[in-house]
Image (cartoon, grey):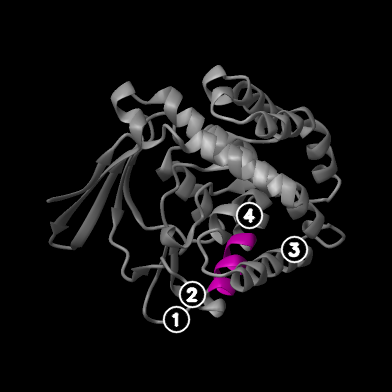
Amino acid sequence: MQQRKSWNLSVVVTAPTDQGTVWFKAVPPFLADEGGVMGRVRRVDPDLPPTVLFHDAGRRVVLMDHVEGDDQWGLVDSSVIEAMVERWVAVQTALVDDVDHLLAVGAADVRARPFAAAVHDLVEDPLVRQGLTSDELTVVDGLAAGLAHRMEQVEGCGLPDTLVHGDLHPGNWRRGADGQGGSLTLLDWGDTAVGNPVLDLRAFVERLDGAALQQRTRHLWVGAWAAAVPGSDPARALRLLDPVAELLAATTYQRFLGCIEVTERVYHRHDPLARLQAAVRVARES
């Protein structure tokens, strides 16, 4: 048995068996029930999540089969990126009517109203405000005050609320050696949420190397959603949600800080502020 990770958000252990290696993972109760989420996803794409061997929803525990392949850190192959985008948009599209089930298995609710409340609580936190300059505070307060109107505009773009992975970066994708889209596995489902699907693009794109590849990926994403929902305007939704995605990351990290023990907060202490500052930069650029 080998301990792979043990920190405030998960415990991951691998163990050899006569059937091969298995992975045990447990997460705290403020994260989604990964086994439950993967079960919902498997209904529409059986091969995308890892194979679940055992699942205890109450304890947020899951036992999974080993997934062969390599995590896609440093991904530069545009054909693989395209396969990922197409695969994930297809899953999101298929799960539009599954929102209630996803919420029932612990997915966070980041739809317009609860999300606006979380942003308000964050930007009113005195410790958060102390870390921002007066100019940054002006932008952040403006984003918070205008969030309801912005989300109304996003709703008008025609994209439905659905499953948001929450941490869709390439390192959470594992690719087998036998191909591209068909051999992809998506890992780490604890940050799952229900909200606008475009919110997943930030984590995916920001870890791609180079502005050209990032922009191409944004175009792929827009094209996939335009095809999935004819008459929608995913390009406008993306522009409107660029700073909002940073606000979502800030509220996620703030939730971590509010739920973990004091001695563990060192891992995320500066993350909400950093994401708010990123939201300021994006808002200024747009």
Q: Is label 4 in a helix, a strand or a loop?
A: helix
Q: Is label 3 in a helix, a strand or a loop?
A: helix
Asked whether the beta carbons under mark 4 and mark 2 sit within 8 Å of each other, the answer is no
Three-letter code, disc 4: Gln
Q: Is label 1 in a helix, a strand or a loop?
A: loop
Q: Is label 2 in a helix, a strand or a loop?
A: helix
Three-letter code, disc 2: Gly
- Disc 3 to disc 1, how far (Cα)? 24 Å
Left or right position of 281 against 130: right
Write the residue at 63% across / 62% down.
90
- Disc 4 to disc 2, how far (Cα)? 17 Å
N-terminal label among 1 and 4:
4
Residue 178: horizontal and vertical position, in percent?
39, 82
- Please name the predominant secondary structure of the magenta segment in the image: helix
Q: Residue furthest front?
A: 134
Q: How busy is the neighbourhood of tag 1: few (under 14 within 10 Å), some, or many (20 plus)?
A: few
Is residue 88 on the magenta stretch? yes
N-terminal label among 3 and 2:
2
Q: Which mark is residue 182?
A: 2
Q: Which mark is residue 179?
A: 1
First to last magenta residue range: 81-89
N-terminal label among 4 and 2:
4
Residue tagged by mark 4?
92
- Disc 1 to disc 4, how far (Cα)? 23 Å
Residue 247: horizontal and vertical position, in percent?
62, 38
Residue tagged by mark 3?
228
Q: How busy is the neighbourhood of tag 2: few (under 14 within 10 Å), some, or many (20 plus)?
A: some
